[in-house]
Image (cartoon, rainbow, N blue to C red):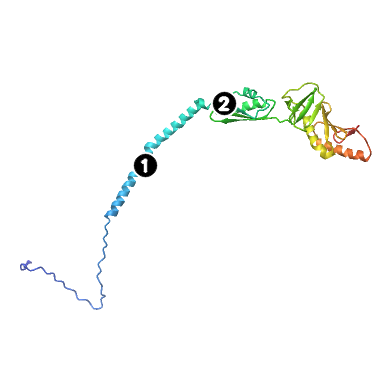
């Protein structure tokens, strides 16, 4: 049996702690006890800021998600309704129907003749058949080409290019002004110094009729090339359905050239014949070039 005797210390005397150091063994390395350095930082402010930022970000994310989930479909539906409603209004609105037609470029052609061929009055601007109207206007005799444009909200603009005078065509005692394609333009004055073709046909013509366009083409090529090839000029051009074009030059020669095919070649043959006739002292008054390389002298 072990008994522990506690000896009480006298009152009034402080308790003492006695430390005993162990003897250092010889040869043992001396170690210095280092206490780790504790750095205390007050992280309360930073942590509060981080927590506040995280909460704000979470609230903003939830708010955006809620807006996308709730309001975007509503906004899309509202926009679709506005677009559809605007399209229906534009389709049915009288403001987008053809209410005015403007004609530009008509001088010899009466504007009333053009308007009569327009059949899209009151139709919707989007569906008005402008192509058919352009084809109908192009059939007018003095119209060379036509373009029709939409000018919003309710105007259609018709741009007409009329045929231009080129020369004259005399027939049955009347002189008519014609264009380069042979269309009769009326009795107006032709350009100064232009070509005149005299026909032996006996019926009268009116504006919009078309004379033999092959004869007009031949006359145009002859007047353009004859001076360069033969050194002379054409003073008279006549036409008959049987012979085609006949030309009389300033030096008194006459040539039958027929239609408009191979005019350059026929003039070259004529120039060659003229050289040989001069060299051989051959005189002639008429040369028939309708058969190309087989000219006939008379």
Q: What is the x, y in percent for residue 48?
A: 28, 51
Identify the disc placed on residue 100. 2
Instruction: Where is residue 206? Give x, y as percent.
Output: 74, 22
Q: Is residue 54 left or right of residue 217?
A: left
**Labelled pair 2, 1 in contact (Cβ < 8 Å):** no
- Mark 1 falls on what kind of element? helix
Q: Is residue 191 left or right of residue 93?
A: right
Residue 171, quarter of picture:
top right
Q: Nearer the viewer, residue 29 or 161?
A: 161
Structural crowding at the residue carrying mark 2, measured as other residues with C-alpha within 10 Å and reported as few (<14), some (14–19) or many (≥20)? few
Most extreme residue toward the top, as rendered? 203
Q: Residues within 10 Å of mark 1 (few under 14, many from 20)?
A: few
Q: Secondary structure at mark 2?
A: strand
Residue at image location 30% in from the left, 49% down from the top: 52
- Where residue 252 sits, quadrant-wise, is top right
Q: Mark 1 sits on what residue?
A: 64
């Amino acid at each position: 049996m072990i008994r522990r005797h506690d000896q009480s210390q006298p009152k009034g005397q402080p308790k003492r702690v006695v430390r005993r150091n162990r003897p250092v063994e010889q040869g043992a390395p001396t170690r210095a006890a280092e206490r780790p350095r504790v750095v205390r930082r007050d992280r309360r402010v930073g942590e509060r800021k981080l927590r506040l930022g995280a909460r704000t970000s979470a609230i903003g994310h939830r708010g955006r998600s809620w807006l996308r989930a709730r309001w975007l479909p509503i906004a899309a539906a509202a926009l679709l309704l506005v677009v559809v409603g605007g399209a229906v209004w534009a389709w049915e609105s009288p403001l987008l129907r053809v209410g005015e037609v403007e004609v530009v470029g008509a001088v010899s052609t009466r504007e009333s003749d053009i308007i009569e061929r327009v059949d899209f009055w009151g139709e919707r601007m989007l569906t008005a058949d402008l192509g058919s109207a352009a084809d109908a206007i192009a059939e007018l005799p003095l119209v060379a080409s036509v373009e029709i444009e939409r000018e919003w909200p309710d105007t259609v603009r018709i741009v007409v290019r009329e045929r231009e005078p080129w020369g004259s065509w005399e027939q049955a005692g009347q002189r008519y002004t014609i264009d380069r394609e042979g269309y009769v333009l009326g009795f107006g004055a032709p350009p100064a110094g232009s070509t005149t073709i005299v026909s032996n046909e006996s019926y009268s013509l009116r504006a919009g009729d078309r004379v033999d366009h092959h004869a007009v083409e031949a006359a145009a090529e002859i007047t353009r090339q004859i001076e360069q090839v033969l050194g002379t000029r054409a003073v008279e051009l006549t036409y008959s359905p049987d012979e085609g074009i006949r030309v009389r030059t300033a030096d008194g020669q006459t040539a039958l050239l027929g239609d408009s095919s191979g005019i350059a070649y026929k003039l070259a043959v004529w120039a060659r014949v003229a050289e040989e006739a001069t060299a051989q002292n051959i005189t002639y008054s008429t040369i028939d070039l309708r058969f190309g390389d087989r000219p006939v002298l008379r």
